[in-house]
Amino acid sequence: MDDVERLVAIEEIKQLKARYFRCMDTKDWAGFEAVFTEAAVMDMAEEAGDVVHGAAEIAAYVRGHVDPVVTVHHGHMPEITLTSSSTATGIWAMEDVLRWPEGGPLGAMHGFGHYHETYERVHGEWQIATLRLTRLRRDVEPAG
Amino acid sequence: MDDVERLVAIEEIKQLKARYFRCMDTKDWAGFEAVFTEAAVMDMAEEAGDVVHGAAEIAAYVRGHVDPVVTVHHGHMPEITLTSSSTATGIWAMEDVLRWPEGGPLGAMHGFGHYHETYERVHGEWQIATLRLTRLRRDVEPAG
Amino acid sequence: MDDVERLVAIEEIKQLKARYFRCMDTKDWAGFEAVFTEAAVMDMAEEAGDVVHGAAEIAAYVRGHVDPVVTVHHGHMPEITLTSSSTATGIWAMEDVLRWPEGGPLGAMHGFGHYHETYERVHGEWQIATLRLTRLRRDVEPAG
């Protein structure tokens, strides 16, 4: 890849991750599923003990956890590296702010950490292939 | 536009939006007005019931609301799309943190949402043509 | 520099600043020192009355202040300007969230401000040459 192709890919991956966040927080679950490769793996082992396989399963898993929750997820300071013309790695700083409705398992959560990701270009479109979340800090308010 | 022209435009629009935030939070009202096209429209209907027309009027409106307020506005995860060589659309995740002085209408506000924007290139410089704010969450502390 | 060289430099400087934040928050002090030029200057006069000279001294200074502290530092909305093929300036909005361990000088701190920076390309790699922090707001909780 030349410099321009690399810069275009980096910008496309940034916009891909933007859709990941926006679709989760606006509960656009079809849009959310579309950011992942069919065989994507979401590693939430540190967070919740779970490793989820498959775009449809990831969307169902996340929807099951946060559909009724007011969620805010922001990503910052991407470090995206192209490893070939159709593969890339990325690290993102993140912050999330969640508030559960009455009767939820928690009251609120405010966290910070990093996403460690890989990407693949499938039929010309970048998608998230693997995602692993590590935490710097996680403050939880119990259900009231 | 070729890829390089498109990437240059996207970077210029990101820096335009950076000036929007920095000028508001440092109360540089001349710099703030300069980020908008002369006929710009700021749609704060969801936020405050207001739709403001014109760069000078937008700057006066925002200044009237936040000049004495300690404000922090951050933008995240831009999705900028060029629709021609001189027009573009953008979505930005946002967070704002406000603290009013003694005697203000509120004590504090902490919010999250998205800006939905359009941009125009006027005399070679990108400016914000329209801006609409939608909210995910808005936490308010009454005046103490 | 042509447009492509300028865009590549801007992306490299964004990833440089990403390493600054990630290495500080994950306490990777060798990685942190490597983001600075040998003669770098960190101006924390407004923050703490200190101006620190030299990459090794900066890393030791920051490590001395935050090694046992749970820290989160995020940067936003970069305004990076190339001033030659090997020098650049940048402004970044920032937020930091700190929590000291038992017995620390403070309990917690939550702040917002701007970094005002310059960069130099040394042996092909961009590094931070000068850094100055200004604040919009700083909320402190005393040690409990």
Image (spheres, coloured by chain):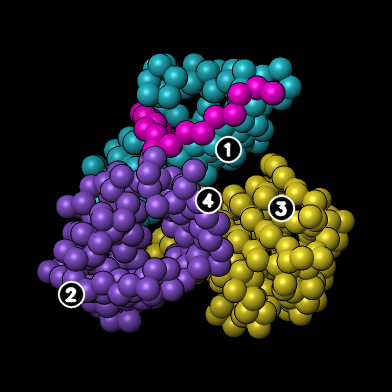
Chain colours: A yellow, B purple, C cyan
- Is residue B124 shown to the viewer in this render? yes
Disc 4 designates what residue?
A: B141
Disc 2 designates what residue?
A: B39
The amino acid type, in three-letter code, at marker 1 is Val
Residue B142's disc is none
Asked if both marks, 4 and 1, belong to the same chain, the answer given is no
Q: Earlier in the sequence, mark 2 or mark 4?
A: 2
Q: Residues within 10 Å of mark 2 (few under 14, many from 20)?
A: some
Residue A109's disc is 3
The amino acid type, in three-letter code, at marker 2 is Ala
Q: Residues within 10 Å of mark 3 (few under 14, many from 20)?
A: some
Disc 1 designates what residue?
A: C97
Q: Residue at x 75, y 49 (%)?
A: A141
Q: CA distance from mark 4 to mark 1?
A: 21 Å
Answer yes or no: do the residues labelled 2 and 3 have beta carbons within 8 Å? Answer: no
Q: Residues within 10 Å of mark 4 (few under 14, many from 20)?
A: few
Answer yes or no: do the residues labelled 1 and 2 have beta carbons within 8 Å? Answer: no
Residue C135, by quadrant, is: top left
Q: Give the secondary structure at mark 3.
A: strand
Q: CA distance from mark 1 to mark 2?
A: 39 Å
Q: Residue at x 44, y 51 (%)?
A: B106
In the foreground, C141 or C2? C141
Picture coordinates of residue B62, whole percent (x, y): 28, 58
In the foreground, A132 or C56? A132
The stretch of residues the image draws in magenta is: C124-144
Say which of marks 4 and 1 sits in front.
4
Q: Give the secondary structure at mark 2.
A: strand
